[in-house]
Amino acid sequence: MASPMIIGISASMGFILADTYFIGELGSAELAALGFVGPIIMIIISASIGLSAGTSSVLARASGKDDHTEMVRLATNSFILSVIISLIFTVVGLLTIDPLFTLLGADEVTLPLIREYMEVWYWSPIFMIVPMVAMGVMRALGDTSLQGKLMIIASMANVILDPIMIFGLFGFPRMEMAGAALATLITRAGTLAAVIYYLTYRFHVLKITKEVISHFGDSYRKIIHVGLPAMGTNMIIPMAGSVLIAIVARYGNDAVAGVNLASRIESVTIIAFYALSAVIGPFVGQNLGAQRHDRIEQALKQCAMFTLIFGAVLAAFIAVIGPYITMQFGDDVAIQQVANHYLYIVPVSYGAYGFVMTANATFNGIGKPLPGVVVSTLRVAIFQFPLVLLASLVFGELNYLIAASSISNILAGIIAYYWVMKTVRQLAPDTPEGTLKQSPAE
């Protein structure tokens, strides 16, 4: 299930890097502006991931029980719910551009660039959240290959449109920052049209009828039971990123641009963890619905082993090639130095962070999302914030702030492992903790 997701997410992250590359060609101020908007965009993306997780969790359990009527109600009403939430983000976002980014530390150089980008980008939540939820439906039904293909096509289209609209090629006007946002909006609109078609005519779960909509309240409660905490879990991370950027802004625009560049490179390198967390929830939900508790624990043990081994290999690999990558995103040595320091320090914790994502997705999959909220809150509010503030006030150097993030990942990973394994071992009915029953077939 994860293999097609890796390909699709790789393509999506690739166009994020392409955005960074082309905007970096405009100048360091534009790259710094992108650093400020990045965490805010990730908050909305994270909200869509959380809503998608809620939909996927309840739908996977209905799929495990082979209840098609319930699947149609959940899929259709989650679609309507995602439209409503998208419009709220658009309205609130457009009304708060200047005060929000001023609060985050944007100055008279970066604020106009941020406004230029976000006045266009804030029209895209409906084209982002709705497809994300629809893809959660597809995953719950066991199909990840189609999602991977859609993500690849959208990413290729975005990479093609980016230079055309940013630099004004082939007769198009030069739009610079606004052009990058418009390219993203257009490609995501195409994705929305595609998922509506597939949910309606391939999966047959999108049916906007009076009977289905009459169950909106019931579907809403089921989805939000997991979706709202999952949204909170996912939104905590970019919110913390916004606070981190506000602190980093004290070190200048080059520091903001460097951390943003490293974060975007990071998002590409940990794609396997994103893919794993995207599919473990539906996997757990389907097996829970089918009463196959033994497979859930076995899968989690394998996931833990994978994240630790792959994370260690990844950290060593990035330490070697990191400087060569950062050189491709502009000629500003100060920005490159900040990015390189980040890529030396934070990847050490990738294995632990990968399992945090897996554990949180598992909690969502079994319909118990609150532990995931607690783990993520511990990671950013109890570990990261105090350590970052201590590093900033006592040590002063930016590298200590970066190290604080790495330490918080490791601590959260340890807690997540013990908590999720204990929770899973308690799932099997009439079975002592730690001794799950095997099915007769095994």
Image (cartoon, helix red, strand yellow):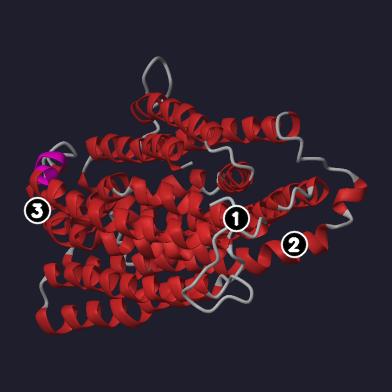
| Amino acid, disc 3 | Gln
- Residue 410: image location, x then y, percent: 26, 70
> In the rendered structure, are the residues bearing label 1 and label 3 in contact, judged by CB atoms less than 8 Å apart?
no
Residue, disc 2: 220
Predominant SS along the magenta part: helix
Q: In this picture, which residue range is highlighted in magenta?
A: 321-325
Would you place residue 63 above or below residue 385 in this image? above
Instruction: Report the residue that reaches farthest toward the right.
Output: 211
Q: Which residue is drawn at 33% across and 50% down?
A: 34
Characterize the local packing of mark 1: few (<14), some (14-19) or many (20 or more) Cα atoms within 10 angstroms: few
| Amino acid, disc 1 | Pro
Residue, disc 1: 440
Give the mark toward the camera: 1 or 3.
1
| Amino acid, disc 2 | Tyr
Characterize the local packing of mark 2: few (<14), some (14-19) or many (20 or more) Cα atoms within 10 angstroms: some
Would you place residue 206 above or below residue 381 in this image? above
81 lies left or right of 170: right
Give the mark toward the camera: 1 or 2.
1
**143 is within the stretch colored magenta:** no
Which mark, residue 337? 3
105 lies left or right of 376: left
Nearer-the-camera pick, 86 or 280: 280
Q: Mark 2 to mark 3: distance in Å?
A: 48 Å
- Residue 69: image location, x then y, percent: 83, 48
